[in-house]
């Protein structure tokens, strides 16, 4: 008989599975009783029926770089110097020039989140993130004995930050505040006045802000997503972006740009660059696309061709849900590629929470929505607004049939 014992995993490997993946795995075990085609409310996933396609010039640049043998080798651990220089110039303002040393490239947003968290926080310290929001912050923090706290967003105010709740979560061990604008999954876009209110809290408590602006440019006509670093004054801002904003989700390359007007980020930057040496840098040939796309046709393509379609889809959904106001209330988005509908669970006879809602909806009507609990928010569902327009009529009809079948 062997004296070998089962090989145990580490504390980090014992962390709970990311709620989003748990939910998607659950869908794989469910069977839809309808013969109708499945409507998946996903985007940026291979096979999804979304309208977010990279511009041809972006793809041409990648193809050109993939054939360039000089881009097959390693580069600086913080990313391709040419790409970092282009990003520094692109994000500089009239009153503040960003140094190339204050730009770092990552292998995707999850790597950026992981490295930022470890570079800013010691074990036992904490940081604040919005609820609801996307990301792996809360799931990975416990593996490093770091505490992730959530502050409320207010649906009745288009998902503005509950400033009182935010400030109540700050203590002597808080190291940074995460802000996401435009919001994923809410689709909100903050005004300059509200951003300045958030900055005032950070200034009062002398906390840096990590500003996730991965949906930069994803705003409806009449709205403006103001880069937080442009108006931050003395507050240090670490702005996150990536190829998501160019609809190239699978390229898995993200960046961090530091606004450091008080020149206080030196020790942090040095530490982050040391952490960057523990893993290989973002792909060289993909990174070399960055100088081509920053001021290329993709910006006009998104503003003039993509976002008007997304806005129209959002309006179709909001108008269609008026017939279902007994059962749910949409929060009208101002941008992004998704929105949140608040469920009125008391109006259902046999549905207790958002998870039951989406599982039964999938089983009975073949519609896959994500429950808000995957974003650490209760009592709502996420609706994608960037699918092909013809999907929405069928979606709303199936949703109406489902709600009427389960309503009191």
Image (cartoon, rainbow, N blue to C red):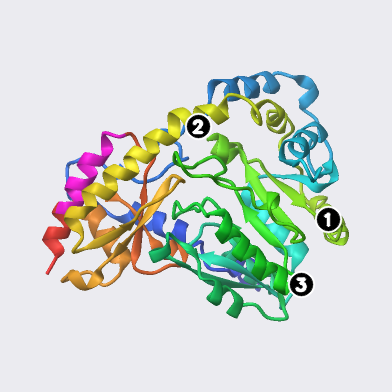
The answer, for residue 99, to whether it is visible in the render is yes
Q: CA distance from mark 3 to mark 1?
A: 15 Å
Asked which secondary structure carries label 3, the reply is loop
Dot 2 lies on which element? helix
Q: In the image, residue 24 lies at what x, y percent?
A: 40, 54
Tell me which segment is drawn in magenta: 389-400
Q: CA distance from mark 2 to mark 1?
A: 33 Å
Q: How many marks?
A: 3
Where does the C terminus fall, quadrant-wise?
A: bottom left
| Quarter of the rendering occupied by the N terminus | bottom right
Q: Picture quarter containing residue 266? A: bottom right
Viewer-nearest of discs 3 and 2 = 2
Q: Is residue 396 magenta?
A: yes
Mark sitting earlier along the chain (3/2) = 3
The label shown at residue 269 is 1
93 or 373: which is nearer to us? Answer: 93
The residue beneath circle 3 is 122
Residue 8 in sight in this render: no
25 vs 155, nearest the viewer: 155
Going from N to C along the chain, the mark reached first, 3 or 1, is 3
- Image location of residue 217, percent across then percent down: 54, 40
Q: Residue at x 32, y 65 (%)?
A: 354
The residue tagged 2 is 302
Closer to the chain start, of discs 2 and 1, is 1
Judge from the rendering whether residue 174 lies leftward or rightward of residue 50; answer left or right: right
């Amino acid at each position: 008989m062997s004296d070998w014992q089962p090989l145990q995993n580490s504390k980090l490997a014992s962390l709970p599975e990311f709620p989003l993946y748990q939910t998607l795995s659950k869908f794989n075990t469910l069977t839809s009783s309808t013969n109708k085609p499945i409507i998946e409310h996903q985007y940026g996933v291979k096979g999804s029926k979304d309208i977010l396609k990279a511009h041809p010039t972006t793809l041409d640049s990648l193809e050109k770089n993939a054939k360039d043998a000089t881009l097959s080798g390693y580069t600086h651990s913080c990313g391709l110097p040419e790409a970092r220089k282009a990003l520094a110039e692109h994000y500089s303002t009239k009153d503040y020039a960003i140094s190339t040393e204050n730009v770092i490239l990552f292998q995707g947003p999850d790597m950026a989140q992981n490295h930022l968290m470890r570079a800013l926080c010691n074990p036992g310290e904490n940081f604040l993130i919005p609820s609801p929001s996307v990301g792996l912050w809360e799931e990975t923090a416990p593996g490093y004995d770091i505490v992730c706290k959530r502050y409320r967003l207010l649906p009745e105010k288009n998902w503005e930050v509950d400033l009182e709740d935010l400030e109540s979560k700050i203590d002597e061990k808080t190291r940074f505040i995460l802000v996401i604008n435009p919001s994923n999954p809410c689709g909100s876009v903050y005004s300059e006045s509200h951003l300045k209110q958030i900055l005032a809290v950070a200034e009062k408590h002398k906390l840096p802000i990590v500003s996730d602006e991965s949906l930069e440019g994803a705003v409806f006509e009449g709205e403006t997503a103001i880069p937080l670093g442009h108006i931050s004054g003395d507050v240090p801002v670490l702005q996150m972006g990536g190829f998501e904003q160019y609809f190239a989700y699978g390229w898995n390359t993200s960046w961090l740009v530091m606004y450091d007007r008080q020149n206080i980020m030196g020790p942090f930057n040095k530490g982050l660059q040391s952490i960057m040496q523990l893993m290989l840098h973002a792909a060289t040939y993909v990174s070399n696309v960055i100088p081509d796309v920053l001021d290329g046709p993709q910006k006009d393509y998104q503003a003039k061709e993509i976002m008007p379609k997304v806005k129209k889809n959002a309006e179709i959904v909001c108008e269609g849900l008026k017939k279902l106001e007994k059962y749910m209330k949409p929060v009208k988005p101002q941008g992004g590629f998704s929105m949140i509908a608040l469920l009125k669970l008391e109006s259902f006879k046999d549905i207790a929470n958002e998870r039951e809602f989406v599982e039964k909806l999938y089983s009975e009507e073949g519609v896959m929505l994500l429950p808000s609990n995957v974003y650490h928010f209760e009592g709502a569902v996420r609706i994608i607004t960037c699918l092909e327009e013809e999907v929405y009529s069928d979606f709303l009809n199936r949703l109406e049939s489902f709600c009427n079948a389960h309503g009191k």
